[in-house]
Image: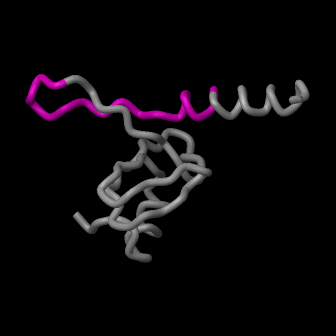
Amino acid sequence: MTDSTSTSKATKATAAAAASTVAVPAIATGAPTEQIPAVGPALALGEAPTVVTLSHHIRIDGRDFLPGAKAAVSAAYARQLRANGYAART
């Protein structure tokens, strides 16, 4: 038996996860755009997200990312991930 509180929390979490993606256009290939999740600390006002390729398995905001996965994060969080070896330095 589930209560309405846990159901509404799950619905809100699913809606928030769906809303936190960034469309990244394919580079001159004509392929459809790739949806990359936006995770980590909130972006500063007017700041564009930085897309990083992760080098190791990491869990951010309750989402598991395998090596080679991409994530859109703030510039400061991207620097932190690179400094700790979780993101490729490209």
x and y percentages locating residue 48 in the rendered image: 42, 42
Image position of 89 (left or right of 43): left
x and y percentages locating residue 22 in the rendered image: 41, 34
| Res 32 quadrant in image | top left
Membership of 30 in magenta stretch: yes
Residue drawn at (52%, 47%) of the image: 39
| Res 16 quadrant in image | top right
Q: Which residue in the rendered view is the most extreme toward the bottom?
A: 84
Quarter that holds the C terminus: bottom left
Residue drawn at (38%, 70%) of the image: 82
Classify 6 as above or below 40.
above
Q: Which residue in the rendered view is the most extreme toward the left?
A: 29
Residue drawn at (48%, 63%) of the image: 58
x and y percentages locating residue 19 in the rendered image: 55, 28
Between 74 and 54, the one nearer to me in the picture? 54
Membership of 65 in magenta stretch: no
In the image, the segment drawn in magenta is: 15-31
Residue drawn at (46%, 34%) of the image: 21
Q: Which residue in the rendered view is the most extreme toward the front?
A: 1
x and y percentages locating residue 3 in the rendered image: 90, 28
Quarter that holds the N terminus: top right
Classify 65 as above or below 17.
below
- Numbered-mark total: 0
